[in-house]
Image: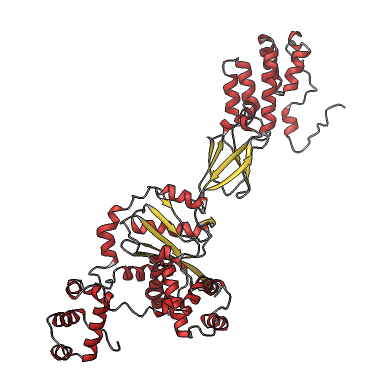
Amino acid sequence: MAGKTKRMSQIKQLLRLHHEGKGKKEIARILGISRNTVKSYLEKAAADQMDIPALLRLEEPILEARLHAGNPSYKENQRYGDLTAKTSYLLKELKDGVGVTRRLLWEEYREEFPQGYGYTQFCHHLRQQKVAANPSMVMPHKAGDKLYIDFAGKTMSYVDRSTGEIVKCQVFVACLPFSDYGFAMAVRSQSVEDFLYALRCCLEDFGGAPALLFPDNLKSAIVKANPYEPDINRALEDFANHYGTTTHPARVRKPKDKALVENQVKLIYNRVYARLRKVPFFDLPAMNKAIKEKVRDHNQTRMQQKNYCRQERFLSAEKPLLKPLPEQAFEIKYYRTLTVGKNNHIWLQQDKHYYSVPYRHTGVKVKVIYTRSVVHIYVKGECVAVHPRVFYGTYTTQPDHLCSAHRHYLDRSPDYYMRKVSGKGSEINELFKLIFAQDKHPEQLYNTCNGLLNLQRKTEGETFNKACAMAIEAGNYGYHFVRNIIKNKMIYLPQETEEQPLPEHKNVRGKSYYKQTLLNFDTNETN
């Protein structure tokens, strides 16, 4: 039957009039349709297994399907069968073949089947088969459940004032699928540090964290892509643990997994890129400030076929369900396995710096986890040392990590030695005071004190005290001098008698004689 399909309500009128005994010409006149149309529908009704009263009781879509079953010839003929048998091959070639087009596949098809479909029908059936093989699904989304994450394919740029160089930047894009609330930010690269920094800024802008992070398979987030269980970058895992959420990357080459953020990228192109294309930028903060303003306008734009904007839906229904953010911002953790050296320190190559470990772990392999501010050292699951991270100097040493001998060596000072001799006698106390009053290198003084303390432990107390007194009296405070006094038993020698004054005689000139600047010889003085 040529022409437009008639309404089923009108066809029911036609069948009812026929069932009441009206003729074809009268039915055509009453309904205002052609007699051939009436004849055609009556023939279709007669060919149907149901009688007219049963047909009249059917719903209109069902009745239309029975009367307009379509022309099944294309499904039953040989051409359709031949094309259907090659559909999977044709779709695979169209997807994977380099430079393969529909026209090329049609030409090959016609060479194999000269009586096959023309190009238009070939494309029509191929398109139907493709849609049937890859149906789309509408994904329901819960408030505060997911955050889709991606990088825009196109970059933005600014001009470096000092060099005039055009610096291209990657644009991080994210959206919450329930409210379609978006976020965008420019960063220098897609490195792990820049990616997690942008993601942290995103959560801070939202004021909370979703239950699931849904990143693309970008290199900064995924180490090894796998359709089922991808190995998630450890830094991203640490980030998720810090914010009390989890991660589930999209499948490789499956943009439908994150269709909303793909659409968000298109909107960002229109509402950020296009509107800022003529604005010159000279640094990254200025660019991000402009991007933030345009994204805010985008979130406040009324959505089509909805009586609200993205921001209204986010604030009213989604933000209260986000997880609260921790007090401290996330810092990337770096992991190393190192061996403790003989000096009970580890060497962190990144800092070119040594960090101490308790001396009992010398020679042991330790796990080191460090952030930008702190270095943690673990042995068999136990944290044995924590150090502030240092980017200058060479050594960071905690005294309690050293053995007693090394700790003693570092603890040496005048106060340390004065405390050790307190209560051991006035002579040695006085001797140590005089030792530290000398203008010598501290290492020399400390070695002298160590020698004297060792000598005291081996010598009878009174003997040692007398030797110290003799050293003080002689003005010689060295270890060897005190040792020789004891060794040579000089403390037992008789004391020298007091010097007697010389007798007076006239040859003594006196001190006034040596003070004069001019010599005055007395002529009367005999030689």
Q: Which is more toward the observer, 68 or 47?
A: 47
**Residue 386 image point, x, y percent:** 52, 39
Q: Relative to residue 481, is residue 380 drawn left or right? A: left
Q: Is residue 412 visible?
A: no
Residue 174 appears anywhere in the view:
yes
| Front-most of residues 412 and 63 | 63
The quadrant holding residue 205 is bottom left
Q: Nearer the viewer, residue 145 or 315?
A: 145
Residue 441 percent across, percent down from the top left: 68, 34
Q: Along the line of sight, which residue is nearer the eye, 51 or 366?
A: 51
Of all residues shown, which one is farthest toward the right? Answer: 527
Residue at x 66% of width, y 10% of height: 461
Q: Residue at x 42, y 65 (%)?
A: 256
Q: Residue at x 50, y 52 (%)?
A: 229
The quadrant of the image that shows the N terminus is bottom left
Which quadrant would residue 510 be assigned to in this image?
top right
